[in-house]
Amino acid sequence: MLLAGLIIGSLVGLAIAGAILSSACSLVRVEPPEFFFSMMLCFVISVAVFMLQFAAGVAGTLGAGVSLESLKSLSDFRSLMERGAVVALISLPFVSAGMYSAALRDCSFRRGLLVWVAQFAVIAIFVVVIWGAVNVLGLTGWRA
């Protein structure tokens, strides 16, 4: 049951990410990819950033003098991933822009960075629309 929930949740998350990517491409005037391709592009970017984070965590762990053989608990692996989190955060826009420039038609690296920034604008618009709909329907219990 847990596995089915993880799979369905991942697919829903990728679908939302794909819709956001397509909308951001339209804002930047890059030809948006098809829906399934945008979902796969978001998946590939997340896997690439995860691999960078893991590699940086391993490098940070080895640099701290901790043997990888001593990592036995979930907490140890969590601290390994925390060591690489900064690298993942810094590299995310550049990995995304590189993937966008390679995968999308008429998209340079600079436009890929613009697509990455435009995704935040699309997310903000979605949040405002959902917040407005919830307020109009009176589901918040808060009155101005």
Image: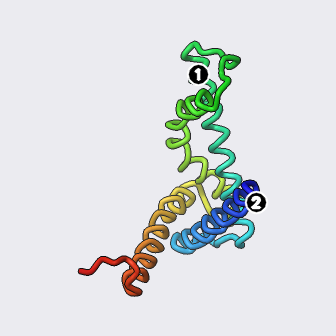
The residue that appears at 55% across and 30% down in the rendered structure is 79
Q: Secondary structure at mark 2?
A: helix
User: Which amino acid type corresponds to the residue marked 1 in the rendered image?
Assistant: Thr
**Residue 71: % across, % down:** 66, 22
Up the image or down, 1 lies above or below 49; here it is: below
Callout 2 amino acid: Ala
**Distance in Å between CA atoms under marks 2 and 1:** 33 Å
- At 65% from the left and 50% from the top, the residue drawn is 46
- Identify the image quadrant of the N terminus: bottom right
Mark 1, residue position: 61
Q: Nearer the viewer, residue 76 or 132?
A: 76
Lateral position of residue 129 relative to residue 41, left or right: left
- Residue at coordinates 44% horizontally, 73% vertically from top-left? 125
Q: Earlier in the sequence, mark 2 or mark 1?
A: 2
Which residue position is annotated with label 2? 4
Residue placed farthest to the top in the image? 65
Residue sitting farthest toward the left: 144
Q: Residue at x 72, y 55 (%)?
A: 2
